[in-house]
Amino acid sequence: MPKRGLLIVISSPSGGGKTTICERLLRHDRLLSQSISMTTRSPRGRERYGREYYFIDKAGFQKSIRAQQFLEWAQVHGHYYGTLKAEVEKQQRAGRDIVLVIDVQGGLAVKRFNPEAILIFIKPPSFKALEARLRGRGTDERPTISGRLRHARLEMAQALNYDYVVINRQLPEAVRQIEAVLTAERLKVRKR
């Protein structure tokens, strides 16, 4: 029977780099799989159903809440997001390390549900850099960006509740630091 996979949470404010970092990790780490979250928001750019997210309407999402299908779920920036329990469990039982790319609220909920989860918070090098990244994406209107920036201050204050904090000054260095965390966690002796 394979060893149970790790549960890894990567969080950052919008524009902090969590999605890009996770994409790099997944390309280079054959033991790592990503859990695909469910959301009520519309796809952005080239996002596709079943690849980045499971896009669903609000009624369908609320039905999944009532059926207790989520490991965690939250309402963020006016949309619902959630991690399906069954998907995470299946990957872990197969011995795969599963990474959740979720917001802080979801990350802390996962830690309460599963204290063994490894939480990694990605901070931008500065608030000014975060604002430039959000504006540079070109995916959100000015009021949405302002709301994301207000929310980012609250999220960054929660970094102290995470196991690791990585500052995303340069993408390759941030990826290397998270790879080092994963290596250390895989080598850790886990007492049963």
Image (tube, rainbow, N blue to C red):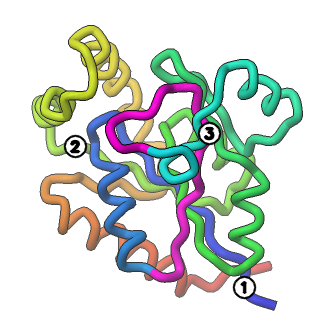
Q: Which amino acid does label 1 sit on?
A: Lys
Q: Quadrant of residue 46?
A: top left
Q: How crowded is mark 1: few (under 14 residues within 10 Å), some or many (20 or more)?
A: few
User: Quadrant of the image for the N terminus?
Assistant: bottom right
Q: How many labels does the image show?
A: 3
Q: In this view, does 17 lie above or below 2?
A: above
Distance from Cα at disc 2 to Cα at disc 1: 34 Å
Q: Which of marks 3 and 2 is nearer the N terminus?
A: 3
Residue at the image position 76 percent from the left and 67 percent from the top? 90
Q: Main secondary structure of the magenta part?
A: loop
Toward the viewer: 189 or 109?
A: 109
Distance from Cα at disc 3 to Cα at disc 2: 25 Å
Residue positioned most to the top: 143
Q: How crowded is mark 2: few (under 14 residues within 10 Å), some or many (20 or more)?
A: many
Q: What residue type is labelled 2?
A: Pro
Does residue 51 belong to the magenta stretch?
A: no
Q: Where is residue 13 in the image (x, y as percent from the top left)?
A: 35, 35
Classify mark 1: helix, strand or loop: loop
Residue at the image position 80 percent from the left and 33 percent from the top? 64
Toward the viewer: 146 or 34?
A: 34
Q: Earlier in the sequence, mark 2 or mark 1?
A: 1
Q: Name the residue under label 2.
A: 124
Q: Which of marks 3 and 1 is nearer the N terminus?
A: 1
- Segment tinted magenta in the rendering: 30-47
Residue at the image position 38 percent from the left and 60 percent from the top? 22
Q: Position of residue 134 (x, y in %)?
A: 21, 30
Q: Which amino acid does label 3 sit on?
A: Met
Q: In this view, does 147 lie above or below 156?
A: above
Q: In which quarter of the image is residue 88?
A: bottom right
Q: Mark 1 points at which residue?
A: 3
Classify mark 3: helix, strand or loop: strand
Q: Mark 3 points at which residue?
A: 38
